Structure formats: C-alpha cells, structure tokens
Image (cartoon, rainbow, N blue to C red):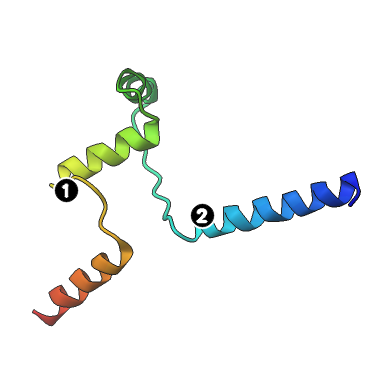
Amino acid sequence: MGENERSGKLQKQRREASKRYHEKIERIVFYVPDGQKSVVQSAAEQSGESINGFVNKAVLHRIGMSEWPSKAASKAAERMQSDD
C-alpha cells in the first residue's frame, strides 16, 4: 500500500470517527458579557478543566445532578413525565 493510499484511508477513518462522535453530542452556545470569557477560562484552568468541562459541571450542579444520564435513561424519564 502506497503512502498516499495509507493517508487517504487514515483520513477516511478520522472523518468516520468524528461523525460517530458528533452524532452522540448536542451543541449549546451561550454568551457572556464582554471580557468575561477570560474569567470563566481562568476559573476552568484553576480547576484543571477545559471551559466545556467546567461549564458542564456548573450546569449539572445547578440542576441538581452529578452526571449526565444515559440517552436511554433520559428518554425513559421523558416518557414517564408525559404519562403523568
């Protein structure tokens, strides 16, 4: 197998892995006042986390959870609530 062929195969595998990953997540965009992103970034770094990880933990804490439920558990809970 030639170098170009290996490179092409690797790129295809990366695209497929990226697609599988993005099918499992949802994106939320939020805004902070001008200049405050650095405050959030600094707090995340002091905690040894990325901004995403820091914000996720903050949201979980605010809604009274310690981790995100599995997708199946979330759907089951939604069904139970709609039955009420």
Q: Secondary structure at mark 1?
A: loop
Residue 46 picture location, percent across and down: 31, 18
- Going by the numbered disc 1, the residue's amino acid type is Met
Q: Earlier in the sequence, mark 1 or mark 2?
A: 2
Displayed quadrant of residue 62:
top left
Name the quadrant containing residue 44: top left
For disc 2, the marked residue is 21
Q: Position of residue 42 (x, y in %)?
A: 35, 18
Q: Given the current orientation, which residue lies at the most extreme bottom position? A: 83
Which residue is at the front of the view, 54 or 14? 14
Which residue has dot 1 on it?
Answer: 65
Q: Left or right: 74 with respect to 12?
A: left
Q: Amino acid at mark 2?
A: Tyr
Measured as percent of width and height from the top left, residue 32 is found at 34, 32
Residue located farthest toward the right when viewing the structure as drawn = 2
Q: Which mark is residue 2?
A: none
Whole-number angstrom distance, CA of label 1 to CA of label 2: 23 Å
50 to 60, vertically: above or below: above
Report crowding for label 2: few under 14, some 14 to 19, many 20 or more residues within 10 A (C-alpha): few
> In the depicted view, which residue is nearer to us: 52 or 33?
52
